Image: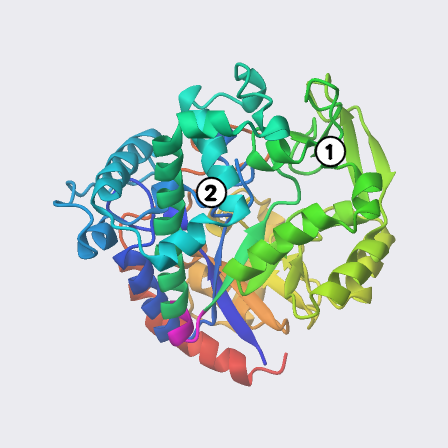
Amino acid sequence: MKRSGVLLPLASLSSPYLIGDFGPDAYRFGRYLRSAGFSYWQILPLQPLGYGNSPYQCTSSKAIEESYVSPELLKKDGLIAELPKKTRCASVRYEEAKQLKRALLKEAFMNYVADEDYRAFAEQDWVKDYAAFACFKELFERKCWLDWEEPYRSWSQDRDPALVEKHKEAIDFEIFVQYILRRQFNALKDYLHSLGIELIGDMPFYVGIDSADVYFDRGSFCLDKDGYPVWIAGVPPDYFSATGQRWGNPIYDWKKMKKDGYAFWFDRLHSAAEMYDVIRIDHFRAFDTYWKIPAAEKTAIVGEWIVNDGDDFFTRLFDKYPDLRIIAEDLGDLRPEVLELRDRYHLPGMRVIQFDTFSPFRKHQVTYLGTHDNDATLAWYAELDKKTQKKILRCFRRRYPGMELRDAFLAYALDAKSELVVLSVNDITGDTRRINTPGTTGSPDWEYKLTSLKEFREQIPFLKERNRLRGENKR
């Protein structure tokens, strides 16, 4: 069955409190997706934001970013007395959002009475670990754990209970924050399911050095005796960047992981599967080969490709979790073995029309006009050479006579033979702003935000008809 979805990062949703959240606009967007004939909502990682506010530099692979809490839902549950003033901003204002949401959560914490559901949540090992990590991180003004003073820096290794007892109230607050976030997320997910909408969640291949994952499981990474990365992750120069992308994430110790049955990775995937219906694994190629950069290098130019044992990984993974639904991000200049690995385990890959406009569509793949790392399609088109622009216009005049350029691009994508097509929300609304520019950090990356859902709502009749035709289209 041919299906379609929309890519909209939660942070980019039109919620009225400085950043998108799990509140009423998320529920409204779900209803709009259903009305337009979509089956999926693709979001970026929901985990706590790290360096540069990047959702791919999370401080935990299991916790949720506290700024995504909905003030309206806190008020509905009687946990806060008054709602703050609404601010419909055109870009995400991260620091203001963090301050606002944290103040509301502290008020809610004072008013909450724990029940059995809360106590069961609080007893999970990952919850207690993350709460301690988050507490210590606040204590040291959000610095990386490598810059903490002792005994905090080494607490994950000795687990001195006296240190936890000393900060019990602050740790209990962090547990409460994660409980409320998970409760709001689960309620939204259940509502989306009632509408027939499933969630596609992005999963970064790597985790950040400044994360609870590395702090508690240092043996799974290539670190020196002091905990600093010996090698870091990235990709060599490509069409995104002339100097490559130096991500800075620590490289996994794959030999150690293979010996322990990939426990760290399988735990991450199991946790992700509890949140999302489908997991899109970013940088899938690293299961076959990964780029290893010496930590001292300032760019990603110097490095080497290391061969990984992806067959062993996926054979064991699907033996343990046979029902996992995974999309493989297989973009870029890949060696054939990457695609062979993808196909052996029947994983749908990706096709981005901006990269490969006129090639035949494959059925078992996910088609995008562009992803969160691409220019908005109209902005991309404006930068094309005149010859390519004319070729696209000739194609669209023949296929979609009289249709405006934005809608012709959407129709072209939805007419794809692929089992799943995902449209980025900025392409639907005709917005020319982009979500992220790979290889850069800081503003305006990750600050893209809708001020309302009006433009999306106005497109519903067109999208509904194109999705109806998509169900009938045999191309």
Give the class, few, some or many, for how many residues have Cα within 10 Å of label 1's Cα (few <14, many ≥20).
Answer: some
Work out whether residue 408 can be spotted.
Answer: yes
Q: Residue at x 71, y 24 (%)?
A: 229
Q: Nearer the viewer, residue 230 or 31?
A: 230
Provide residue 247's location: percent of width, then percent of height. 64, 31
Q: Is residue 194 magenta?
A: yes
Give the class, few, some or many, for how many residues have Cα within 10 Å of label 2's Cα (few <14, many ≥20).
Answer: many
Q: Nearer the viewer, residue 259 or 439?
A: 259
Residue denoted by label 2:
435
Provide residue 327's location: percent of width, then percent of height. 65, 60
Q: Residue at x 47, y 72 (%)?
A: 39
Q: Nearer the viewer, residue 469 or 265?
A: 265
Q: Is residue 59 left or right of residue 106?
A: right
Distance Cα–Cα, label 2 vs label 1: 34 Å
Q: Quadrant of residue 228?
A: top right
Q: Is residue 126 above or below residue 184?
A: above
Q: Is residue 196 magenta?
A: yes
Provide residue 54's location: percent of width, then percent of height. 50, 36
- Which residue type does callout 2 highlight? Ile
Work out whether residue 426 can be spotted.
Answer: no
- Disc 1 secondary structure class: helix
Q: Residue at x 40, y 46 (%)?
A: 178
Q: Which residues are magenta?
A: 192-197
Q: Is residue 245 above or below residue 184?
A: above
- Which residue type does callout 1 highlight? Gly
Residue denoted by label 1:
219
Of tags 2 and 1, the one toward the viewer is: 1
Q: Quadrant of residue 31?
A: bottom left
Q: Is residue 111 left or right of residue 347?
A: left
Mark 2 or mark 1, earlier in chain: 1
